[in-house]
Each structure stands twice: as structure tokens, then as C-alpha cells.
Image (spheres, rainbow, N blue to C red):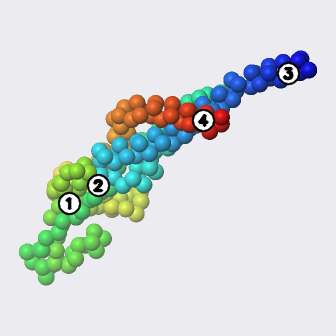
Amino acid sequence: MFEDDLKRAQLQLKAIPSFVDKVQAKAINSATRKALTLAVNGIKSQVNLKSPYIRSKLKVYHQATAQNPVGVLGVESRGVLLDRFDGQQIVTKSKNPSRSKGDPLRGISAGYKSQGTTVKIKPNSGNTFFKGFYIPLKNNNSMGIAVRTGSGQKDYKVLYGPSVSQTFKTVREDIAEETKDLVVTELLNTLESIS
């Protein structure tokens, strides 16, 4: 009888490290998902982008396992068209309204012409006006904001704002300590729920 109890105790002791590794991985994965929400909120506080758009660019690239207890949160590295920052086309009445056909593609009515565009890059700032214009983009069915770079028809440059990946670089440092605390809290909560 004593030998059976001893063998059972030995088996339970051998199972403890793998059990702890599994609990640790579960806590890390939970903390990584919560860190993703922290990152979305941090980015949103710095740039005027919608939360679903930011969320679509962030993802968990690696989930923790018992063998590799590391969770990796990353972001797609891609430019963000300036139009995403509440871009608005400003129009004014044409000097000769009867000659002005307007531009249905850009939403300009007859008798009006484009005066420029406004954007709001930071969430707590005002709109910025500049002599930009909307132009259809080649590879998709959307419009971008551009500025002239010369006098030719193709002398323009499509403008981009700060990307989610650029902003994530600073936010990542801002949420690092809170993320570490999340891992510890999740680990303690998981262990408490088991006991």
C-alpha cells in the first residue's frame, strides 16, 4: 500500500512541471489578447483612426505553448492613405458657374470647384487645410488625397499619414509594463481557479 501511494505521489510530482507550463502558456495567451486591446486604445489616442481599422492591422503572430511560453503581438507594416484621417474635400462656388461642369467622380456639383482638402491626424487637434485634391487610385476602387509636384497631368504625389505600425512602435513601449503585470495577474487568476 505504501509503495502504491509513493508511486502515485511520484507520478503527480512529475506532472507538476508540465501542468505549470500549460497554465503559464494559457496566462500568456490571455494577457497577449488583452495587450492587443491596450495597443488599439494606445494607437487610437495618438492618431485619428477608427478602432476597427486599427484592430484589423494588429494581430497575435504567435501564441504561447507549454514548450515555447512566448506570445507575440505584431502589426501589418503598410502605409495609411491620408484620406483615412477624416479627409474632406472643400468646394467653393466657381467664378463662372455656368461653365463649371463639376466633377461627379469627386462629388463636386456643377457650378462648384475644389478649393482643397482638410484632414485631422491627431484625435485632439483641429482640421488641417491644404491645397490637395482627390484622385482615383490605380489598384483599387478608392480615392486618395494628392498634391501637385509640377505642372504636368501626372505630376502629383498621393499622400499618406502615420501608419499603424509606426504608431505601434511607441505604443509598444508605453504598454510594456502593463502587459507584464497582465501576465502575472492572469497567471495568478488561472492558478486560483484551479485550486
In the image, residue 163 lies at what x, y percent?
A: 34, 44
Label 2 belongs to which residue?
A: 85
Residue kind at label 3, given as amino acid type: Asp
The residue singled out by tag 4 in the image is 192
- x and y percentages locating residue 112 in the rendered image: 16, 74
Instruction: Place residue 101 in its image quadrant.
Output: bottom left
Residue at 51% from the left image edge and 38% from the top image edge: 31
Q: Quadrant of the C terminus?
A: top right
Vertical placement of residue 193 versus 117, above or below = above
Q: How far is disc 1 from disc 4 in space, using C-alphas?
A: 56 Å
Sequence-wise first label, 3 or 1: 3
Judged by depth in the image, the label closer to the viewer, 1 or 2, is 2
Q: CA distance from mark 2 to mark 4?
A: 45 Å
The residue that label 1 is drawn on is 117
In this rendering, position of residue 67 left or right of residue 132? right
User: In 3D space, how far apart are the residues under numbered discs 3 and 1 (Cα atoms)?
Assistant: 79 Å
* Label drawn at residue 99: none
CA–CA distance between discs 1 and 2? Answer: 11 Å
Q: Of the two numbered discs 2 and 4 on the same chain, state the one appearing first in sequence.
A: 2
